[in-house]
Image: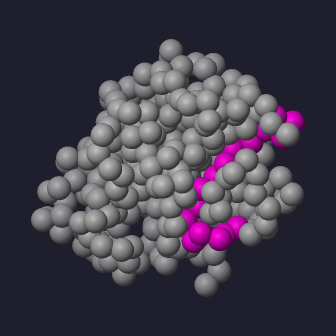
Amino acid sequence: MDLADLGGWFHDPEEVDRQLATMPRPLFAAAAPLLSGSGTGKTTLLYKAFKDVNNGAYIDYPAQTIGDCVSQGFGHGVDLLEAVQIALGHKAQSFHQTATEAIYGMARVDIGGQRGSYSDGAVGAWAAKAVSTIGTVDRDLVGPYDGNRAKSWGARGVPAAIKSKAGQHKVQTVSMVETYEELEDALANGYPVPVCSNQGFTLQRDEDGFCRPRGHWGHCMLIVGVRADKRPGACIFQSWGPDMPTGPIGLDQPPNSFWADRDVVSRMLAMQDSWALSQFEGYPGQAIPDRWSYARFA
């Protein structure tokens, strides 16, 4: 299967606006005014939190098998949010992965009204609304990732017995990130950002770990870091398996990630369906460890 076929993001500005109108803190700039400028000029390697909670190794996420990328981006985002909080000492519990199939079903059926539809895909705003109003489910509760399960729950809804557990694990605040500057501020304070856009990329990293923009995908991924050096950009975590894209890596990035140049990421965010995730009511400032943020590097 062509990896581009494993997209599944619906570009639907009217639907995004409909969800924004129901959210208590719809826009990151207004929800986090005290964070403005806090990430400017910083290199924030938020993805290192995964290593802190996983015995020094990155998580070996399996590849998605249907067009459920929106739930993958948000599920991995919830995982990183939890990893950050555990690493910062705000949560004592052990790390558990999030069941992406449950996010997919709740986003499509409960929020998006797609019951009975077996075509793949979702709007990012649906997932943002689902994880913040319905909640999330531990992977341990449903078993290993299964694309057939995602397909079924995306058409029929999440079984009631499982959905009833979701309210225990809600993301407290979701807000739209529209600019690269807002992205820097979110990441510098420990808030990961699922990004939805139609920007495609090559599948071969260059010598700096970057992939060049090429073509168009309707896709959701997760932004897990930013760098502020001679080649500024963002680290994007994807859901196509542990060794994709291929090629060199930089700054100890996860093997299933790539860097994208700042101007490219800015265009992606400008499509207005990318969301900062917070475990708090709002976005208080948080000091992240020096090992996640380097002022300069070779």
Relative placement, left or right, of 137 versus 38 is: left
Q: How many marks?
A: 0
On screen, 157 above or below 90? below
Q: Position of residue 284 (x, y in %)?
A: 43, 22
Relative placement, left or right, of 280 versus 80 is: left
Q: Position of residue 99 (x, y in %)?
A: 34, 63
Q: How are the colours assigned in the image?
A: one colour
Q: Is residue 79 visible?
A: yes
Residue depicted at 48% across the width and 21% down the height = 285
Residue depicted at 73% across the width and 38% down the height = 227
Q: Position of residue 57 (x, y in %)?
A: 55, 58
On screen, 175 above or below 123? above
On screen, 253 above or below 242? above
Q: Is residue 111 visible?
A: no
On screen, 139 above or below 291? below
Residue depicted at 68% across the width and 39% down the height = 226
Is 242 part of what is drawn in magenta?
A: yes
Residue depicted at 50% across the width and 34% down the height = 190
Front one among 255 and 181: 255
Magenta stretch prevailing secondary structure:
loop
Relative placement, left or right, of 204 versus 221 is: right
Residue sticking out furthest to the bottom: 1
Front one among 110 and 103: 103
Residue sticking out furthest to the top: 34
Q: Which quarter of the image is occupied by the N terminus?
A: bottom right
Front one among 258 and 293: 293
Q: Which quarter of the image is occupied by the C terminus?
A: top right
Q: What segment is highlighted magenta in the picture?
A: 229-245
Is 52 part of what is drawn in magenta?
A: no
Q: Position of residue 48 (x, y in %)?
A: 57, 46
